[in-house]
Amino acid sequence: MTGLAPEKTAEPSVQPPNRRAPRRATGPGFRPSPAGPGVDAPSTLTRVLSGIRHTFSSPKYGPVLVTLLLFIAVFVAGGLRYNGFFSGQVLLNLFVDNAYLIVLAVGMTFVIITGGIDLSVGAVVAMSTMIAASLLQGGWPPGVVIPLILVLTSLLGLLVGLMIHVFEVQPFIATLAAMFLARGLCYVISKDSISIVDPFFVSFAQTRIPLGGGLSITPSVIIALVVVLAAVWVLQYTRFGRTVYALGGSEQSGMLMGLPTARTKVLVYVISGLCSGIAGVLFTFYTLSGYSLTAVGTELDAIAAVVIGGTLLTGGYGFVLGSVLGVLVLGIIQTIITFEGTLSSWWTKIFIGGLLLVFIILQKVLTAKRR
Amino acid sequence: MNATIGKLAANRLFWPVVMLLALFAINLVAFPGFFAITIKDGHLFGSLIDILRNGAPMLIIAIGMTLVIATRGIDLSVGAICAIAGAVACSILLGSSDPSNPATVAVAIAVAVGISLLLGVWNGFLVAVLGIQPIIATLILMTAGRGVAMLITEGQILTVNSPPFKAIGSGFWVGVPIAVVIAAVVFAVAALITRRTALGLMIESVGINPEASRQAGVRARGLLFAVYTFCAFCAAIAGIILTANQTAADANNTGLFIELDAILAVVIGGTSLMGGRYSLTGTLVGALVIQTLVTTVYTVGIPPIATMVFKAAVVTVVCLLQSPATTAAFASWRRTAALRTAGKEMAA
Amino acid sequence: MTGAAPVVDMTDISISFPGVKALDKVSFRMFPGEVHSLMGENGAGKSTLIKALTGVYGIDSGVITLAGEHVSFSGPAAAQAAGISTVYQEVNLLGNLTVAENIMLGREPRTWRGIDWKAMRARSTELLAGLHLDIDPNSLLNEHSLAVQQLVAIARAVDVQAKVLILDEPTSSLDADEVAELFRVIRSLKADGVAILFVSHFLDQVYGISDRLTVLRNGALVGEYLTEEILRIDLVQKMIGKELTALDDLEKRTHTASTSGSVDNDEVVFVRASQLGRAGSVEPLSLPIGEGEVVGLAGLLGSGRTEIARLLGGIDRADAGELTISGKPVKLRTPRQALSHGIAYSSENRREEGVVADLTVRDNIVLALQADRGWFRPIPRKRQDELAESYIKALNIRPANPDALVRNLSGGNQQKVLLARWLAIAPRLLILDEPTRGIDIGAKAEIQKLVYSLAENGMSVVFISAELEEVLRLSNRVAVMRDRQLVADIENDALTVESLLALIADGSDSASANSSVEAVLVEAGPAQSAPSQSAPSQNAPAPTAPSQNTSGGTP
């Protein structure tokens, strides 16, 4: 967002040699999706191999695959090292403990694909918990409180989006203002922690959905997964979703192609606000309290998850499922540190920082190769 | 008259200064003794002195941040560097047999600053050599840095008892708070270095057009190393002042959100986040606006915890006023005003 | 053709920007099934007119009708829906999305489940096949060359079943083959009754493809003409609006500095490239540049002329061959190293790689000199003022204010500021890549004169220009580039525009190349006829004149 993109200006627009006959610039076997007919490659094996190489070196798919491999590797390593690690419940708990973060990461993915950033999500989560706790304390029914929270957080996102679009304030600054506002409102509501005793919230927090075999998840996980599925559908199968990608590619081009860029740009912040609201509600289920200092720095976790999940911070590339994977990687590192016992919690931050470094360099390498 | 105001409004220092004056006015109404400065025990006291002293660490960081932002960069890691510098200094002082010895304090500060410089070089390496977007490059240290600080303090809050160290945060020199003196020195040094040498020209040139600068033979790499290292240096100084003021290193909370305040100060001061032309004076005004706002909230009697809401309001207002849409609106208003004046003269 | 009613009719269109009247009561019309060229120098108002037609800009006054109906577009989307499609010069597509999406974005086939990717791919494949483009619609657009991207943009335009297709400088990044391919597509669209608005700086192409011309100058309409009825020289005069005499006095001074053929002598060679090349950019080539010599680099855009210049200037790194400066081998890794050897490269891309727009004229002039000294040894302010003032005076920079921001200067004056920057470091070799592009004729003549006097004072100059007349007028020697290779390196004593054109266009062995040669030669037809027709006129220099002058004038 600060727009230092030397690779764009530094590189001369040198075209590779263009002979007329072989205009196929991609590798002979490159088929990201099910291979179409009529690709005459030498043999299936070399085709598959070159396809794999191509996919790994693609800025679109490469980082996600690396993340997937990393997750599997860490999971297997943990399983070999610790007793009781290699269980379905450990895996499921990653979802249970991080349901709210998954939802946050989904919203953040939309914003980052457009090339923006949202620093307000952690503060909005805290604000949601405060609103929920204080209204429930005041006797409001959950059926009113929850929708109200979602409307308010979406409204905040709308304001941020309008600030960014109409007044051309940088996303960094606009969402920073929203972050201050949300945090400040938390303190205005109360500076103390408010616990929640509302029966609906309590029962929702305590419900476990058995999956058989002694495994179980919480309703929050279901909600998070529904949000994820909805986001996948929106990004992949709607014009709005494709316009989100177009914005990350080039807003100018998108506009000249006749896409509704303005509306889309504002809407991604509304979506991020809505997701923050949902995440806030899930977080409230998880903690059964509202506290103004909660979720400090969560925006960094969400951004880290999105980056580790393969979304380019410069925009244009990324998948919601990648971000989910990113959250799981963060979660499993936390789990490992818990299992290790002797490692102190601050190692989590150092690990996440190290992972970010690795993935950012990976992204750099992959995009640099493509000019 | 209208035209003059319009012309003034086009100056990028106009709105920040108006904002600062407005805040002063509010203070004056709420607290008539706002501008009074008294001398007690040879030390200066008063609201304005408080603003300067409390704002010093943020101002120092904002100075470094201004140069980074001018090169189209941003440094999110300054808060973490504050924490690391404080943690290093305190752990050295705690580990020494004589923490009250000024020489020990000097060593502790030197090591803390030295380590921070290395961190700055690291940021510079990521940005200048690997070519990673600054916001992302410094995000790494922002995330990992507090972990490193906690590693140094082993998760504890390190409280030190060292009068010379404490003096950096809360002492006075010729009646002026030492923190303010340090900030003034950093400001003067930054202004001198950038304006008396060609550093300022080079930074702006790289910030406005990196490729054209490269072709003109400007070595951006060295410049980027220099500004990120300088920014880390500023962060280290600020971190030491903050830590000294509390006589304790708190890896979690030292310098928390200070990067955001510093960036805000720069933006309010009229330096664009897109890089290019910068104004250290603007940054000074921006830092004063933010700190005065914080003080105002106290003076007026609003619960201090609500400060953030007001910060949000100030950011929003300043950004909206500086936005191209508003500038355009002002320009057209100026034109019509001028036309109207001309019309009146014609009529008369 | 002319019997039908116009599909587009713009009447008395005016558009103002703060301080500028971009279009002043301009009228413009297009008929179905014709190719209409919009001609004009930079700043004539071509792009403003296009943006008015496509709804990017609102108009202040005037009337636009499309197929007889009054229209007022709220934006590009509305214009597109009404049947006006645009392919912009800098391909405005999305490199991060697939080819199929770039073709169909905004009009994706949908089912109840959302976008129907399968149908989308099928439709794209069909459209690409129509353009003889065999690429995977699933591949990312940025994996393809600019030329392919351009054709994808046309495929997108074709898909909306446009009544009007606007091609804004579509050929600037294409080679001869690709231009021929594009023209084939244009002709077939034309046959389908599409009205095509064609903008190109290449007169050959304009004469080769268009039926009708509209000329704009300084935001005003000059006139509408049938291509076959207007002579090239008349067209140029209408575009630039000034008599060509401004350049006349240069003729007499041609080649006084010529060292006639002795450049291979190592004593006078300043820079020598030996098999210097860069993969994917320019094939290895050898080129000596003598002291005080003006070497012209001729060739089409993308022929390697800019690429070799960038290697000489250290902008890009050579990966083959070697470079010697004054007989010593050197490796140039950065522009800074080249500058330290006395080689300055002045980019063709003035705005993006040349001037620093938000700095003052003074700062821009001293920038390279200051960078050379390092930031800790600032040039004293007094010296800066002297430098700025002397160059403002010497190059006639307007406004003559060293504190003016370069962004507020006209293109020609920006170019002069850039030149001043390089002259301030007193280079031994100055590489000028299209220094006269897009600037007014007066500034052009001044820059040409400057190149002369520099060479006369012993500076070596590499001069690149798309205008062959200009290259011939200025150069002692001309190196001709084609398909990334050096195809000729000859003394400028018997060269003419025709012989140069032939060298640039001459074909090689392959069949496809042969066909393209024909295309270029055919299109070059008017180029040959126009100067000969202009020869009797006193205003225009006959292309053969320089060589005659040389042979006669050199002692």
Image (cartoon, helix red, strand yellow):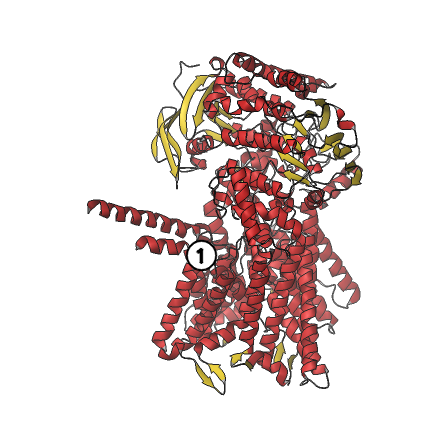
Residue B348 horizontal side relative to residue C145, left or right = left
- Residue at 56% over, 35% down: C90
- As drawn, the residue found furthest toward the left would be B348
Q: Pointer 1: what residue?
A: B12
Q: Would you place residue B341 above or below residue B42 in this image?
A: above
Q: Residue at x 63, y 70 (%)?
A: B236
Q: Is residue A187 above or below residue A272?
A: below
Q: Chain of mark 1?
A: B
Q: Residue furthest front?
A: C555
Please say if C25 is above or below A50: above
Percent x, y for residue C487? 72, 23
Callout 1, which amino acid? Answer: Arg
Whether residue B227 appears in this view of the structure is: yes
Nearest the eye: C182 or B20: B20
How far across and how far down the image is residue C416, in percent?
A: 55, 38
**Above or below — where is A33 with respect to B118?**
above
Q: Is residue B192 left or right of residue B32?
A: right
Q: Quadrant of the N terminus of chain B?
A: bottom left
Q: Secondary structure at mark 1?
A: loop
Q: Residues within 10 Å of mark 1 (few under 14, many from 20)?
A: some
**Identity of the residue drawn at 61% across and 32% down:** C453
Is residue B219 visible in this depiction of the protein?
A: no
